[in-house]
Image (cartoon, helix red, strand yellow):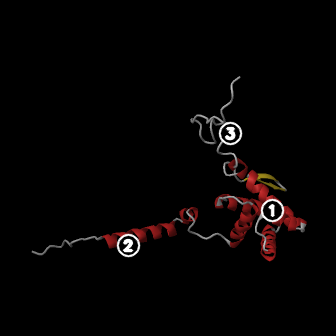
Amino acid sequence: MTSFRKEFKINRRSLLLGMSALAAASFTQFPGIAASNGYIHEPDSIVQFMLVSKLLVPHELDPFVGHKIHNALSDAEEGFDNTVTALQDFIMKNAVVDVEHLMPALTDTILKNSALKIISAWYSGVVHGKSGDRIVAFEEALMFKVTNDIMTIPSYAKSAPNAWDATAVPLLNMPSF
């Protein structure tokens, strides 16, 4: 009598190919996961905004916060993407390398005000608009990054935002008299 059981063998190559096919399928099934990991490209307007922001704010910028700032500024300011394009064109045309050289060279009031709004949004984490203020970042606001090694971000938590049970780090050794 013949056996109907087929012998099943798996080798390393077929295992790796199967795992990579499964991973690729999961990214097409769940685009939110792929987008959060940076696998899906951002629209050109956001890429352009991040390039201008990198010149205006010479820090390590979080792309997620940049996306939120861009959306908030687009809602608050009519034709914001056109203003960012004009800013980038001005930067390229004048070969500006940093914000210290850009701001005095900007004579157009609309471009200068938009540049200041971008800088303010990155540092404060707030976008000021016609309909009110919109908070886009708290922990990632750059005004807290400057002193994060010695100061905690203002919060009701003891040591840092979302750190309710940690003991606070002393700010400095206070002299006793």
- Identify which residue, 62 or 75, lies in the foreground: 62
Q: Which residue is mark 2?
A: 17
Residue 25 is situated, as x and y percent measured from the top left of the image, at 46, 70
Q: Which mark, by number, is residue 100?
A: 1
For mark 2, give the secondary structure. helix
Q: Earlier in the sequence, mark 3 or mark 2?
A: 2
Q: Name the kind of residue labelled 3 in the image.
A: Ser
Q: Is residue 165 above or below residue 177?
A: below
Q: Name the kind of residue labelled 2 in the image.
A: Leu
Q: Earlier in the sequence, mark 1 or mark 2?
A: 2
Residue 114 is situated, as x and y percent measured from the top left of the image, at 83, 63
Residue drawn at x 85%, y 67% is 111
For mark 3, give the secondary structure. loop
The residue mark sitting in front, 3 or 1, is 1
Cα gap from disc 1 to disc 2, whole angstroms:
52 Å
**Contact (Cβ within 8 Å) of mark 3 with mark 2:** no
Q: Which mark, by number, is residue 155?
A: 3
Residue 39 is situated, as x and y percent measured from the top left of the image, at 56, 68
- Total marks in image: 3
Asked if residue 77 shows in the view, the reply is no
Image side of residue 128 versus residue 152, left or right: right
